[in-house]
Image: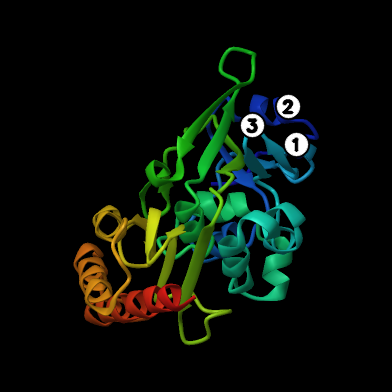
Amino acid sequence: MTVEHYWAPTTLPDALDHLRGGDVTILAGGTDLMPQTHAGRVTLRRGLLNVRRVPELHRVERADGAIRIGALCTITELMRDPLVREHFGILTDACDHFASDQLRNAATIGGNVCNASPAGDTLVPLLVLDAEAELASKPNGRVETRRVPLADFFSGPGRTARAPDELLCAIRLPLPAPGFAGRFFKFGTRPALDISAISIGIGGVRRGSALTNVRVAYGAVAPVPLRARKTEAMLEGSPLDAASIDRIAAAARDEVRPIDDVRATAWYRKELVFNMTKRMLGDVAQA
């Protein structure tokens, strides 16, 4: 299909006006959209909406006990932002493993989320941080917003809960509890450049020899980035001794649902999950 209309609005209400028909492709950084279009995996719709000039989508700000990250914040900007660095080290760490410097300068957090790849680098730490997607639309001439927990936002590879007339405006991250610590791990042939074979995020508040308020997430091991609820339940409040860590890592291996592909076999991914979960929890126990 040939693009018939191109818009580059400078306000959020104008951008939402153009989405009301639904037959529109949204362009932000373009680092996913353009290669997929050229490869024939994505077909541009009749309208192409470039949202990069909408200032509301660039902001990082504190609001109501949370940090609100505009959807157009680039990976480089996230790595350098003082609020993100102060409160969300696990996200900063993941950004440091995101592709190359050139791509980090263009790729946006909103694009990474909406691309909905099971291996998306920012998605695992965002799940660990209990992120919410903030969506906006203008169905009756007035801007309306809603929030969707990121754990419920992904419905399949490349599919999300975003409606055709909605725009992802921001990612909302509640401020972590005092004492919260997070760990991120990504495995690939070249971890800073390749698509991950697996990625792991673990977060919680240290209480003596255990973790509380635990969140565990895995990437590239299921059709969507996976919040590992059974593994979380086993880890919650459990002393981090060798026997417990073994049981928790085995539960994680059983919970993931990987496939065979060009990057790794399902068996290998499961073994990576087991071994790297053990290593990460061992590091936490010794910290």
Secondary element at tag 2: helix
The residue type indicated by label 1 comes to Glu
Question: Where on the picture, by quarter, is residue 216?
Answer: bottom left
Task: Tell me, for residue 56, which label it has, or none.
Answer: 1
Secondary element at tag 1: helix
Q: Which residue is mark 3?
A: 64
Q: CA distance from mark 2 to mark 3?
A: 26 Å
What's the coloring here? rainbow
Q: Position of residue 223 (x, y in %)?
A: 31, 58
Decide which of tag 2 and tag 3 comes sooner along the chain: 2
Image depth: mark 2 or mark 1 in front: 1
Q: CA distance from mark 2 to mark 1?
A: 12 Å
Q: Do we see residue 37 in this rendering? A: yes
Q: Which residue is mark 2?
A: 14
Secondary element at tag 3: loop
In this rendered view, identify the residue nearer to me: 179 or 101.
179
Q: Position of residue 9 (x, y in %)?
A: 77, 35
In this rendered view, identify the residue nearer to me: 205 or 72.
205
Q: Are marks 1 and 3 in contact (CB under 8 Å)?
A: no
